[in-house]
Image: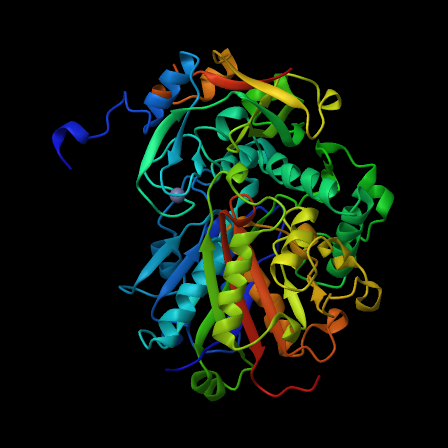
């Protein structure tokens, strides 16, 4: 690998690069040039076919709830936030992502449309974050 | 090549104990080697399944438990794969015996889960999930499995009552198992009315937090016969890792578990229909349903009928008995020890010492042990009866 090709913190193939783009409003995924698998977040090789021929492409931020639940017994630092809703969302690109849903459990159902946004970490979430994660935004799904 | 066999087993009490991990191991070792020569005479390598140093602030479990067993300057290592660590230890031991590298190996598992209370266990277990997306979103083990359960209930005819019946069945089995953490039978309403943990999963859908250690001596049939002990053959083993994030996997057909089971069946030269008894990774009730399908016991979408007697199940189900030990749900789930505890149940079923919970005529067992959520990693073993015993 030549020096110019090396991954750095600006590359969306690394987590700092992915979260930096997300903070700017861009959801980036790896898209396999060989089989079309959507890799969220991007990564250097495709788990669908093994190819390293992965392009980085902006993704739609809209999708549907694929499955969901509410966390009633959270990690101790998030005690005051519980119960909070989490879901697996299938984006319009076909890629799936787990995340918080900004709605009560009872107001959510499979198939409901949502849109991905971001917010800064709360103080409690910051207390759980590692130093390199402190500036990463948290992705949250909003019902639409 | 020698066939690996399990020739001795032992476990500590499972549940809330006053013992640190090494003492739990001492209790397991004492039972396994009662009336036998010293472990150092029968084994010259050690594998230890152990989930997390967060409980006791202790790693180096290979070194520590080898020492506690009286073995020195031998290969000894901790194996990590969250809750699949115990079966990984068994798999490594079986492969070492099969390829002739060692004639006897200790396959061990240990976890001191109660050390940090429920909150400590919640934190330690969440380390098994993807850090960047899943952990930062505040997921927990029950909520990860709840995502599977919600989708399973959406796509199949299964109901929350069916999942509750799996818990009821496993408590009923555990009541006949002296090794079990829970000895109380429960009814369906107890499960359905228990507090929500991550809907649709409730407290009684979840395996408990508990301490425990377990050990199995893996050796050859020749050694076991010389010792005059009953033994079972490790006829097949398989393992597969799927993606760490559950969203990236098939959430209703547990592919990694199917791959692991198929490779264990293939090595053993057996089919799902040949299996009489199975211990599957029912960390949450829905797992027993999903794994019954992945193991090839149940038609797709009907694994939830595992609690029914064979004649009442959907056509296409085998007549296998699921989790006669009480499973993770009621026998208990001391993470790193669970895979070895599953092997102990199979050993007792296949050597005719399972008492009131014996599956009549059992000759073949399947074990499925998982780590992370569902098939992030799965380890499968097929065990078959060795010595002729009166059954
Ligand atoms: Zn591909």
Q: Is residue B342 left or right of residue B324?
A: left
> In the shown orientation, is residue B270 left or right of residue B323?
left
In this rendering, the answer to whether B178 lies above or below B119 is below
In the rendered view, would you say A48 is above or below B315? Answer: above
Question: Image point 61% across, 62% down: which residue?
Answer: B295
Where is the C terminus of chain A found, in terms of image quarters? top right
Q: How many marks?
A: 0
Res B27 visible = no
- Does B161 sit above or below residue B109? above
Res B217 visible? yes
Q: Nearer the viewer, residue A80 or A24?
A: A24
Q: Residue at x 41, y 39 (%)?
A: B57
Which residue occupies the foreground of this view, B181 or B369? B369
What residue do we see at 33% from left, 77% from top? B100
Q: Is residue A141 left or right of residue A35?
A: right
Q: Quadrant of residue B169?
A: bottom right
Q: Quadrant of the N terminus of chain A?
A: top left
Q: Quadrant of ligand 1?
A: top left
Residue B2: x and y, percent?
40, 82
Q: Residue at x 36, y 42 (%)?
A: A34
Viewer-side residue, B49 vs B1 = B1
Residue B185: x percent and y percent? 81, 53
Q: How far across and how far down the image is residue B48, in percent?
A: 42, 57
> Coloring scheme of the render?
rainbow
Measured as percent of width and height from the top left, residue B339 is found at 53, 58
**Who is closer to the viewer here, B274 or A82?**
B274
């Amino acid at each position: 690998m030549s020096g110019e090709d090396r991954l750095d913190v600006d590359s969306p193939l690394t987590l700092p690069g992915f979260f930096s783009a997300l903070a700017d409003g861009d959801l980036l995924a790896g898209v396999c040039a060989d089989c079309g698998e959507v890799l969220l977040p991007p990564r250097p090789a495709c788990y669908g076919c093994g190819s390293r021929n992965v392009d980085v492409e902006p993704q739609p931020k809209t999708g549907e709830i694929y499955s969901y639940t509410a966390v009633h017994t959270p990690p101790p630092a998030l005690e005051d936030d519980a119960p909070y809703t989490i879901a697996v969302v299938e984006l319009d690109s076909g890629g799936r992502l787990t995340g918080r849903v900004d709605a009560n459990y009872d107001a959510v159902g499979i198939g409901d449309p949502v849109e991905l946004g971001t917010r800064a970490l709360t103080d409690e979430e910051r207390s759980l974050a590692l130093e390199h994660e402190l500036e990463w935004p948290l992705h949250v799904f909003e019902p639409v | 090549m020698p066939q690996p066999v399990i020739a001795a087993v032992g476990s500590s009490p499972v549940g809330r104990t006053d013992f640190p991990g090494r003492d739990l191991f001492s209790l397991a070792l004492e039972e396994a080697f009662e009336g036998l020569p010293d472990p150092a005479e029968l084994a010259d390598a050690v594998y230890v399944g152990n989930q997390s140093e967060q409980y006791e602030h202790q790693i180096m479990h290979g070194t520590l438990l080898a020492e506690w067993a009286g073995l020195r300057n031998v290969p000894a290592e901790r194996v990590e794969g969250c809750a699949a660590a115990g079966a990984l230890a068994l798999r490594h031991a079986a492969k070492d015996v099969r390829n002739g590298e060692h004639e006897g190996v200790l396959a061990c598992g240990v976890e001191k889960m109660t050390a940090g209370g429920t909150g400590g266990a919640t934190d330690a277990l969440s380390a098994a999930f993807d850090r960047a997306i899943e952990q930062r979103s505040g997921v927990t083990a029950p909520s990860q499995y709840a995502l599977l359960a919600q989708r399973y209930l959406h796509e199949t005819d299964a109901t929350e009552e069916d999942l509750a019946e799996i818990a009821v069945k496993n408590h009923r089995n555990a009541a006949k198992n002296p090794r079990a953490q829970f000895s109380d039978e429960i009814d369906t309403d107890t499960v359905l009315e228990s507090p929500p943990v991550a809907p649709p999963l409730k407290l009684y859908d979840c395996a408990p937090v508990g301490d425990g250690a377990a050990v199995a001596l893996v050796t050859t049939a020749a050694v076991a016969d010389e010792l005059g002990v009953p033994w079972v053959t490790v006829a097949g083993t398989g393992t597969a890792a799927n993606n760490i994030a559950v969203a990236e996997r098939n959430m209703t057909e547990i592919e990694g578990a199917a791959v692991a089971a198929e490779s264990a069946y293939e090595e053993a030269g057996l089919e799902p229909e040949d299996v009489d008894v199975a211990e599957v990774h029912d960390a949450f009730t829905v797992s027993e349903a999903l794994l019954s399908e992945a193991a090839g016991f149940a038609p797709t979408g009907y694994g939830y009928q595992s609690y029914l007697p064979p004649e009442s199940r959907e056509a296409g189900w085998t007549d296998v008995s699921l989790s006669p030990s009480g499973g993770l749900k009621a026998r208990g789930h001391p993470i790193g020890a669970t895979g070895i505890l599953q092997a102990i149940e199979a050993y007792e079923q296949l050597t005719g010492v399972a008492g009131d919970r014996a599956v009549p005529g059992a000759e073949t067992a399947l074990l499925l042990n998982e780590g992370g959520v569902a098939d992030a990693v799965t380890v499968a073993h097929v065990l078959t009866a060795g010595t002729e015993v009166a059954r």
